[in-house]
Image: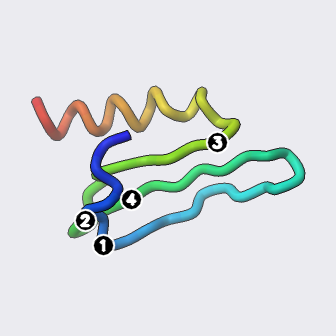
């Protein structure tokens, strides 16, 4: 979600191949601009809220 292709920094928060989980956030100038999750859909709500704050 967001605009991960515009990120200048990528942070991998979780990468568990056995559990098939991945959580990555994308930042530009220190600000969250995108997120990707696999097997961690519950984490998307927090990213969605943060991204919405920037666009409001």
Q: Position of residue 11 (x, y in %)?
A: 49, 65
What kind of element bears circle 2? strand
* Disc 1 from disc 2: Cα separation: 5 Å
Mark 1 and 2 residues: CB-CB less than 8 Å, in contact? yes
Residue 38 is labelled as 3
Q: Position of residue 32 (x, y in %)?
A: 31, 53
* Disc 4 from disc 3: Cα separation: 15 Å
* Disc 4 from disc 2: Cα separation: 7 Å
The mark lying in front, picked from 4 and 3, is 3
Residue 26 is labelled as 4
Mark 4 and 2 residues: CB-CB less than 8 Å, in contact? yes
Task: Please give the name of the residue rendered at 64% of the width and 42% of the height, measured from the top-left corner.
Answer: 38
* Disc 3 from disc 2: Cα separation: 22 Å
- The residue under label 2 is 28
Mark 4 and 3 residues: CB-CB less than 8 Å, in contact? no
Q: Is residue 54 left or right of 4 when viewed as pictured?
A: left
What kind of element bears circle 1? loop
Position of 3 relative to 45 (above/below): below
- The residue under label 1 is 8
Q: In what quadrant of the picture does the C terminus appear?
A: top left
What kind of element bears circle 4? strand
What residue occupies the far front of the structure in this picture? 5
Label 1 neighbourhood size at 10 Å, few (<14), some (14-19), many (20+)? few
Label 3 neighbourhood size at 10 Å, few (<14), some (14-19), many (20+)? some
Task: Please give the name of the residue rendered at 13% of the width and 35% of the height, measured from the top-left corner.
Answer: 55
What kind of element bears circle 3? strand
Q: Position of residue 33 (x, y in %)?
A: 28, 51
Mark 3 and 2 residues: CB-CB less than 8 Å, in contact? no
Q: Is residue 29 left or right of 15 when viewed as pictured?
A: left
Mark 3 or mark 2, which has the lower sequence index?
2
């Amino acid at each position: 979600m967001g605009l991960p292709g515009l990120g200048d920094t990528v942070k991998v928060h979780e990468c568990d191949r056995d559990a098939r989980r991945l959580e990555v956030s994308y930042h530009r100038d220190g600000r969250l601009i995108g997120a990707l999750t696999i097997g961690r859909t519950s984490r998307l709500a927090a990213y969605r809220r943060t991204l919405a704050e920037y666009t409001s």
